[in-house]
Image (cartoon, helix red, strand yellow):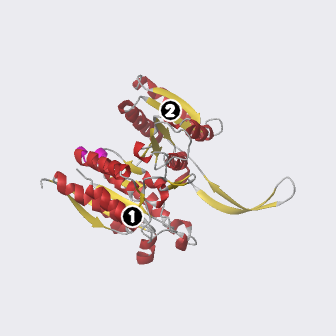
Amino acid sequence: MSRSYNIVSIPGDGIGPETNGAAVKVLEAVSKKYGFDPRITEYKAGGCAIDAYGVPLPGETLEAALESDAVLLGAVGGPRWDMIEAERRPEQAILGLRQGMHLYANLRPATLMKELGNVSPLKDPGNIDLLIVRELTGGIYFGKQGSYKSTEKLFDGTRKGTVAFDTESYSEAEIERIIRRGFEFAMKRNKKLTLVDKANVLCTSRLWRQIAKTLTEEYPDVALDFLYVDNCSMQLVSRPATFDVIVTSNMFGDILSDLAGQITGSVGLLPSASLGNPGMPGLFEPIHGSAPDIAGQNKANPIASILSVQLMLKLHLGEKDAADSILEAVRKTLADGARTPDIAVHGDGEDKGITLVTTEEMTDRIVANLE
C-alpha cells in the first residue's frame, strides 16, 4: 500500500468504546478495498484516563494526537466522575484536545436521509441538508470563570450568597477565520450563509455581525442573513429545509447542532469534524455523548462514528472514493431496514419493514455493504 495514515483512536467512556470500535472496524475494512493503510494506535482520554492516570488528558495522548494525521474520538464523561473538580472533569479532555491541536472550526452536517423515511419527529421536515460551522476554541467555554461569596442583597432583602460567573470574549481574528470558513463552505454548497448570534444583547455578537458584513465583499455570490439564536431554534423546527450553512459561536453551535440532530432523527446519526489550519491533524467524532445508561449493552447507534470516518476520509485525507463507499454502505444498510433502538421506534410504535439490530450487527451490515 502506497498511502498510509497515522490515526489515533481515543475510545473514551460510556458507549464510546463501542461506537469508536465500530468506526475503526469500518475504516480497516474500507482501507483494504481502496488500497491505503490506516496505522491505528489507541490512547486514553476522559474518565478512563482519570482512573488510570489521574488526569482527563494525559500528555502522551495529546502528543500522539499532534503527531497524527487524524484523531478518531468516541465520547467522554459519565456520572461516576460528576463530583470531580471542574478542571479535572472528563470533558476537559475534549476542550484540551481542541485547544492543544488548534482546532477552531467544528463542522456538523445534519442530513435527513431518505432511507430513514419518517424517522424525523417533525410532521413535514422536507429535504433537510444543512451544515453548522461552529467556532471551537473561543467564547464562554474558554473565558474567565469562577465564583465568590457576595454580601449584597436582592431587592427583596434576600442575600445573594454564592455568585458564579462565566465570561465570553472573542477577538476579531477568531471571528474572521471561522466566518470565512462559513463563506467557503457556502460557496461549495447552495451559497446561503446564516450567522446565528444574540446581537440584540451581546457585545460579542455585534462584533460577529460587523465582521460578517465586511466579509460579504469578498463573497458576493453568497447570500448572507442573520438570526438571533432563539429565533433560529424556532426556525430550525418550522423550516429546517431552508437552511444551507449556519455559522455561529462555540456555545450556540453546541446547542443548535443537538437540535439539528434531533430533527434529522437521532444524534446517533450525526458526525462532526474539527479542523484547524491546513496541514494540521483533525479530530473526528460523533456529536452524541457517552450515554452511560446504555453503555455495554450493544444498543448504541454506531452510524455517527462511522460517518465521522467518512468525513475524515473525504475532508481531511483525500480518500474520496473510500468516503463515498462508506456513505453508500450506510444508506444501503438503512434502506434494507436495519435499525438500532434510537431510530427504530417513533410516533405510534415500531416502523414497518425494519429489523432491530445491535451495535455490532449494524456495523457488520455496513461492512458487508461496502463497495
Q: Which mark is residue 270?
A: none
Q: Which segment is the magenta one?
A: 314-320
Q: For residue 69: magenta?
A: no
* Sequence order check, earlier mark of 1 and 2: 2
Q: Residue furthest left?
A: 2
- Residue at point 44%, 76% (across, down): 51
Between residues 328 and 76, which one lies in front from this camera angle? 328
How many numbered circles are shown?
A: 2
Amino acid bearing label 2: Thr
Regarding residue 10, the answer to whether it shows in the image is no
**How far from the left and from the top, in percent, is residue 58?**
39, 69
Regarding residue 261, the answer to whether it shows in the image is yes
Between residues 334 and 204, which one lies in front from this camera angle? 334
Would residue 231 be found to the left or right of residue 11 on screen?
right
Query: In the displayed structure, would residue 125 be above or below residue 85?
Result: above
For mark 1, what is the residue? Answer: 359
- Residue at point 40%, 23% (across, down): 221
**How far from the left and from the top, in percent, is residue 226?**
55, 31
SS assignment at label 1: helix
Would residue 123 be found to the left or right of residue 307 on screen?
right
Q: Quadrant of residue 114?
A: top left
Q: Which quadrant of the figure contains the N terminus?
A: bottom left
**How far from the left and from the top, in percent, is residue 368?**
26, 57
Query: In the displayed structure, would residue 203 be above or below residue 257?
Result: above
For mark 2, what is the residue? Answer: 242
Label 1, residues with CA under 10 Å away: few <14, some 14-19, many ≥20? many
- Residue at point 52%, 68% (across, down): 293
- Residue at point 45%, 45% (across, down): 117
Amino acid bearing label 1: Thr
